[in-house]
Amino acid sequence: MTREEIKTAILVFFRKEFEIENPGMEDNLREVHGFDSIDAIELLLEIEKLLGSELTHEEKKRAMDIQNLNQVCDYVESLAKVRNIGNGQVKGVIT
Amino acid sequence: MERRVVITACSAITPIGRTKKDILDSLVNGISGVKVLREDDVLTPYIHSKVFGTVDYPITYDFKRQYRKTMGPVAYYACQVAKEVLESAGLDEAFVTGGRLGVAFGSTHGSPTVQRGIYKTFFSGSQAGYSSIGAVDYLKSMVHTTAVNITKMFGITGRVISSSTACTTSSQSIGYGYEMVKYGMQDAMICGGADEYDTTTVAVFDNLLACSTAFNDTPHLTPRPFDTKRDGLVVGEGAGAVLLEEYERARKRGASILAEVIGFSCNNNGGDLILPNLGGISETIRLGLKDAKIPADDMDFISAHATGTKMGDVIEAQAIHNVYGGRPAVTGFKSYMGHTMGSCGAIETIIMTYLLAEGFVVPTLNLEEVDERCAMINLVRVRRECPLRIAAIQNFAFGGVNTSLIIKKWEGR
């Protein structure tokens, strides 16, 4: 799972589900786009679909410090590495 | 301290229309909003009653995603009527968000559509598992979802009351809102109720043999409150909201006053949770008059709960006769739209506000041959002009909860 694949999937989700078009990768999601705790939980569910596996409580707690899209991609990338998900192996489809 | 409380705005989504004009047209022309029960692909094949009070016209919502994301269908209804009430009233934003405006709003049981989705995940053999329940599912389905989605959308910071007492949900909302303003806890309250299309409610009443089944091929002929051929209630959907304001505040800001709320009562039968109770209902009516500080003879027009069940209509007629005798006009508005459950009290209050202002009464739809056990009260049989000054809205719910709201025509002071 490449960084670009992750970024594309996340941006599609942000556009379709959060109605956030072309967000800056360094935008503070809460301050710029009104992203709140409910959105964060919804995003975690989508990340689970993308990875094809459930996140542990510890992994979910780590996500609470995320503030921008680059950090979201970092987070997914690290989770994919732990799960040995290779390039081109996007598991789920982010709807 | 007791303050006067007035209605300064109202809005409804009903099976017989949205606007005052549409609703009055349906009432005057005897148009029913009861249609064939929509398919849900789950329960409808098993339900004997195939009729439903249906909202079948499009409603355009323009809610932003930040509000939509915590809303099930019932909250869409609630927020839409609340939005229209606030727009119509023209309250300034500082007041709306300042803590002196509260919300009293409820529904029978949150959003059954959302709850059904949760159960489907669990019982369909899906591998999606525990975490597939969306974070917002609770916010969409909880019993106070209507009230708090309203507060969120408009930034309202005052009190929140969220009744969830089935058929008395929104009459309690209005009654408790009235008391909030009357006794000075709030200066205004958005009050009402909503319920979405839901076949579980139909199934519950169907299993209790309380639903109408004899008119499945002619839905517009049922329910038939007080009629000899009545065979049960018809479940429906809808929403209603009113804005209650303290009179002096409303007058000073030049608000258009639609009616005054002068009395409210609520009690419980203290026993059976299903059967109507003559003593309990009669007492509610008496307590309402006491709160309004008026004699029974002052009552002009009664919106009866009148669901069209065999027993309920007779008990209600007896209770009306016990307290009021045979003078006030009586109509059952569920005959036009079915039983809109959590919203019926608000919708019926709005209808009575319209009719007080217009000065005419309409008959109970489908009332062709009056059950002789109900004939001692003054059931309206034809539309007629008549001076109306004071009206009551009666509602009774599963759980033995009874309410009576009393409103007065606004005569300029």
Image (cartoon, rainbow, N blue to C red):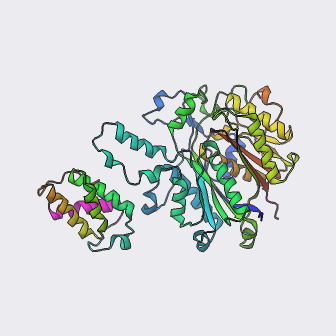
User: Which percent across, then down, holds residue B80?
Assistant: 55, 57
Q: Residue at x 51, y 63 (%)?
A: B153
Q: In the rendered image, which quarter is residue B321 located in?
A: top right
Residue B61 is one of the magenta-drawn residues:
no
Q: Is residue B367 visible?
A: no
Q: Is residue B62 above or below residue A34?
A: above
Nearer to the camera, B59 or B308: B308
Quadrant, the N terminus of chain B? bottom right
User: Which percent across, then down, holds residue A36?
Assistant: 39, 65
Q: Is residue A49 above or below residue B310?
A: below
Q: In the rendered image, which quarter is residue B179 located in?
A: bottom right
User: Which percent across, then down, holds residue A43?
Assistant: 31, 59
The prevailing secondary structure element of the residues shown in magenta is helix
User: Which percent across, then down, holds residue B193?
Assistant: 60, 51
Give the left or right position of residue B242, taking residue B409 as reference. left
Q: Residue at x 61, y 63 (%)?
A: B102
Q: Which residues are magenta?
A: A1-20
Quadrant, the C terminus of chain B? bottom right
Q: Residue at x 79, y 59 (%)?
A: B410
How many discs appear?
0
Q: Residue at x 39, y 60 (%)?
A: A38
Nearer to the camera, B213 or A89: A89
Give the left or right position of residue B31, taking residue A91 as reference. right
